[in-house]
Image: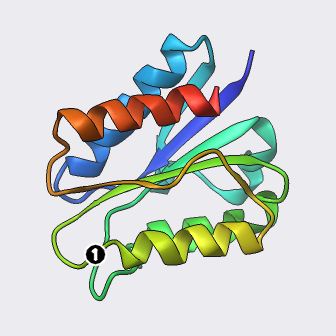
């Protein structure tokens, strides 16, 4: 059985809703799961999990949230090599550049991305919810 962490930061609740769908998908696939906010997770926890889903909305000029999420994620970079990783998040403007940049950063660190990052504009609709559940299953 896979042990999966779902780690997210959410300002409006949209990315939190996505995190809960990733959690549902992973649990439905039989994985042991734990869900964390960015403030509750750190790089030293990476070794405790077979796979990690990271969720963060696009902020500012299409970047990761800078005060909590980005510092936590930077601390996890060293633990990405060879690890199954999934990425997700919502946005309100732009075209998803933050996700493409984030995916490239993960690949450069040696992560095994299980799928393209799951993104949605504002609140997740039925299609985004289904994609989040599929991401959870892929991580499992």
In the visual, does 89 lie left or right of 43? left
Residue at 45%, 27% in the rendered image: 23
Quarter of the image with the N terminus in it: top right
Q: Which residue has dot 1 on it?
A: 95
In the visual, does 112 lie left or right of 125? right
Question: Which x, y percent locates residue 46?
Answer: 74, 48
Image coloring type: rainbow
In the visual, does 101 lie left or right of 89? right
Answer with the quarter of the image where residue 18 lies: top left
Question: Which x, y percent locates residue 122?
Answer: 15, 57
Q: Nearer the viewer, residue 8 or 86?
A: 86
Q: Is residue 108 above or below residue 46?
A: below
Q: Is residue 23 above or below residue 123?
A: above
Q: Is residue 20 visible?
A: no
Question: Which x, y percent locates residue 37?
Answer: 43, 48
In the visual, does 47 lie left or right of 132? right
Residue at 64%, 75% in the rendered image: 105
Q: Is residue 46 visible?
A: yes
Q: Residue furthest bottom?
A: 61
Quarter of the image with the C terminus in it: top right
Q: Is residue 40 above or below residue 92?
A: above
Q: Nearer the viewer, residue 32 or 71?
A: 32
Residue at 51%, 16% in the rendered image: 27
- Could you classify mark 1 by the number of other residues whose Cα lies within 10 Å: few (under 14), some (14-19), or many (20 or more)? few
Answer with the quarter of the image where residue 131 lies: top left
Residue at 41%, 76% in the rendered image: 98
Q: Nearer the viewer, residue 127 or 93?
A: 127
Of helix, strand and loop, which one carries label 1?
loop
């Amino acid at each position: 059985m896979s042990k999966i962490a779902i780690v997210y930061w959410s300002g409006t609740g949209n990315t939190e809703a996505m995190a809960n769908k990733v959690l549902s998908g992973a649990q439905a696939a039989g994985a042991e799961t734990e869900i964390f906010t960015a403030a509750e997770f750190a790089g030293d926890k990476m070794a405790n999990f077979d796979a990690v889903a990271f969720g963060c909305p696009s902020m500012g000029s299409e970047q990761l949230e800078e005060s909590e999420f980005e510092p936590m994620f930077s601390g996890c970079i060293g633990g990405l090599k060879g690890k199954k990783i999934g990425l997700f998040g919502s946005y309100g403007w732009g075209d998803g550049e933050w996700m493409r940049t984030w995916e490239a950063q993960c690949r450069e660190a040696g992560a095994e991305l299980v799928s393209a990052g799951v993104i949605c504009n504002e609140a997740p609709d039925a299609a985004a919810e289904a994609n989040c559940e599929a991401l959870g299953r892929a991580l499992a």
